[in-house]
Image (spheres, grey):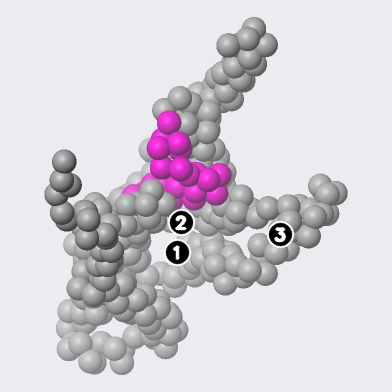
Amino acid sequence: MSRKSQLQTTNYYKNEAKKASVIYPLFVLVLCSLTVTYLILRDLDWEEHISIRRGLWLFGSGLLFFPALFIILNNFQFHTHEGRKFIRAYKLSHSDVFDISNKCVSAVQALFCCLTGLTCVRYSCSRDILRTSHYISEAYGWFGAAYFFYDTWSMYRVWSAKMTQPQMNGIKNKIILKTARITAYLSSNFMIVFHHIFIGCFGFLVITYLRGGLGDCFFGYIYLMEVSTPFVSLRGILSKLALKTSKWYISNGLVMLGTFFVFRVAMFPYVINLFAQSIQVDFITALTKLPRNCLISISLLLFPQIYWFFLMVKGATEILFFKQKPNRIGNNNNFKKKSR
């Protein structure tokens, strides 16, 4: 190797090490955001409500935590020896790396939701099911609202990495190019962007201010809908790694189906039954006792889950029972012993 090549290689690794070093301050930032969250909540009584001042601090902590974690995962894959080895082994593109990082952060957010939901259910459902609240529900409403705004940006990064210059009609001006990318992203992903903004704004307001004095038991189960999300994320990651035929993919898919059905479909009649027991009526009567807005909300949440579950079952059935085996085409000479 020539001296010039050696120098270029040395500079390359120095540059990569410099980029990888960004991981450490970002990791400190992640820890700081969690520490601030803990300090904000540590002196609250169990059933105390979150003030706007505390809520804004929690929202700010979320805005730091989720993007920082996403950037850490990207930098680890792009700029460390282990990360580059991982990318080469599975032949990942830039968009694949961004997508894997996005799904990992999504799984972390789902874990936080599950812990929040479990706390609410254990505390509130064992007391006054309709009125008892735990501060963690509102607290994560503030912190978690930041996730939906982060994820809108993160999904844009994934989408943008897939776009090439020719696809953007050869635009060279950076400002115009960026504007064109954002416009194209919003137009092609309008529903998911609208969903994130709607949940981040309206869903947040329902949990924090518009619940009408309703306790956290039911909201705890809404949080627990995220139990299936880590398995959905893992399925996407395994797909990116070209492991769709592996036992990991099939096993994860079955667990995903089970958790999705329990926590996103069967959960709704179970919660309504809890409500029926709390007011000492039968299931059908309890449905008639629910406010119209509540019934509409349940319908809007439940019907998409049933549709998605149907699609999941259909996909799993095709993989498990109707997967076609590739035809083996070979020369007859392959089955004959060669004569010497």
Q: Are marks 1 and 2 in contact (CB under 8 Å)?
A: yes
With respect to residue 114, does 285 lie above or below? below
With respect to residue 320, does 39 lie above or below? above
Residue 167 is marked as: 3
Task: Mark yes or no: residue 35 visible.
Answer: no
Label 1 vs 2, first from the N-terminus: 2
With respect to residue 40, does 127 lie above or below? below
Q: Which residues are magenta?
A: 85-112
Query: Quick one: label 1, few (<14), some, or many (20+) residues within 10 Å?
Result: many
Residue 94 is marked as: none
Label 3 vs 2, first from the N-terminus: 2
At 22% from the left edge and 60% from the top edge, which residue is drawn? 332
Residue 4 drawn at (x, y percent): 67, 11
Considering every residue shown, the one lying at the far front of the view is 340
At 65% from the left edge and 55% from the top edge, which residue is drawn? 163
Considering every residue shown, the one lying at the far top of the view is 3
Residue 141 is marked as: 2
Residue tagged by mark 1? 207
